[in-house]
Image (tube, rainbow, N blue to C red):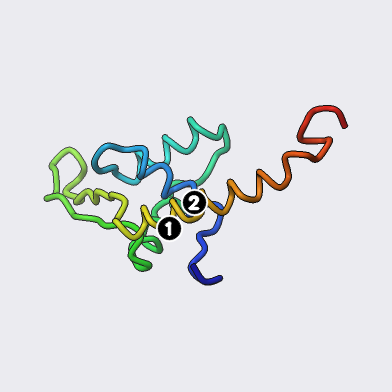
Amino acid sequence: MGRGDTPGALEQMVLLALAGRAGEAAGREVYEALIAATGHEVSVAAIHITLSRLEEKGWALSRTEAPEPGRGGKPRRWYRLSEEGGRVLADLRARMARLWEGASGHPHLRGDG
């Protein structure tokens, strides 16, 4: 994975939120999952922008559902993790595990510093 292929922090969280869904998720569901998991507020617009960027990179896939009358005629877009997105997350997890392993001896991480 090259430097430009490493997801940023929000991209990582959105990819993980998608991975945590058995199937597909709408942008609002990803937004709610992130708030529930992190306790930090993120704008819905930032989530939609990130989902679009992930799709451009090939790490997420989407489909558009026909407009619903209850939504003012607006179509809904559903996202899911792509196979490539899964590989990106697996690689990132392995790299982070190696870093954590190397840092585990630090006193601040052991609780005695």
Labels 2 & 1 near each other (Cβ < 8 A): no
Asked whether, in this view, residue 84 is left or right of residue 88, the answer is left
Q: Position of residue 9 (x, y in %)?
A: 56, 53
Quarter of the figure that contains the C terminus: top right
Residue at 19% across / 51% down in the picture?
A: 75
First in sequence, mark 2 or 1: give its number.
2
The residue labelled by disc 1 is: 88
Front tag of 2 and 1: 1
For the image, the number of numbered tags is 2
Which mark, residue 12?
Answer: 2
Would residue 92 be found to the left or right of residue 57 on screen?
right
Residue furthest to the right = 113
SS of the residue under disc 2: helix
Task: Estimate how packed mark 1 is, as few (under 14), some (14 to 19) or many (20 or more) residues with alpha carbons within 10 Å.
Answer: some
Q: Residue furthest top?
A: 112
Q: Looking at the picture, does residue 25 appear above or below residue 4?
A: above
What's the residue type where badge 2 is placed?
Answer: Gln
Q: Position of residue 78 (x, y in %)?
A: 24, 48
Query: Who is closer to the viewer here, 51 or 68?
Result: 51
Disc number placed over residue 40 in the picture, else none: none
- Residue 112 rendering spot, x and y as whole percentages: 85, 28
Point 13% across, 42% down: residue: 69
